[in-house]
Image (spheres, grey):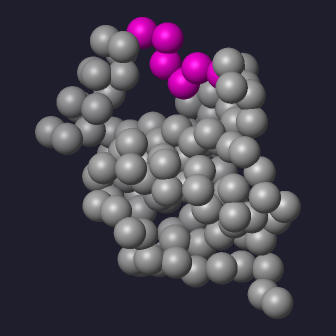
Amino acid sequence: MSPTVFRLSPVGGYDIPALEGWLEKMAARGMVFEGTMGPLTLFARREPASLRFHLEPAHNKTDQEDPELTALFQAAGWRYLGIFRKNFFVFSTDRPEAQSHTDPEVLDYAIRRFFK
């Protein structure tokens, strides 16, 4: 059995809550996000896990990790997994209390800037 699984996303590429929910369902089935390749999403086979996901909008299309952003999320209990279609940095956590944003206005600003 291959350690990598490829899937097409069943939701729109800019529907952040739906993408996060889909990644959570895939992790519960033992497939954890690794990255994207064109329209395909790559998953690593692992033990089923109850993970929460957060997609942080990238202000510029990128294929590079943002070390400063990663450090901030790690300090809040999140783990960097990769980039979703050059649009989002993907983070996961198994801690239910971990917060991706404590200020809704900052999150709103990041999303509005992303869609400009």
The vertical placement of 36 against 48, above or below, is: below
Q: Residue furthest left?
A: 116
**Residue at horizontal 49%, vertical 48%?**
21
Q: How many marks?
A: 0
Residue 46 x %, y %: 81, 64
Q: Is residue 11 left or right of residue 78?
A: left
User: Residue 88 appears at what percent x and percent y?
Assistant: 43, 48
Q: Nearest the camera: 3 or 24?
A: 24
Q: Seen from this angle, which residue lies furthest bottom?
A: 1
Determine whether 81 is above or below 4 in the image.
Answer: above
Q: Give the percent coordinates (x, y) of residue 91.
A: 60, 41
Q: Residue at x 36, y 45 (%)?
A: 16
The image shows residue 74, relative to residue 16, as above or below, that is above
Residue 93 in sight here:
yes
**In the rendered image of this protein, does residue 37 appear above or below residue 83?**
below
What segment carries the magenta color? 98-103
Q: Quadrant of the N terminus?
A: bottom right
Residue appearing at x 52%, y 38% in the figure: 54
Place residue 112 in its image quadrant.
top left
Q: Quadrant of the C terminus?
A: top left
Q: Main secondary structure of the magenta part?
A: loop
Reply yes or no: does residue 102 show up in magenta: yes
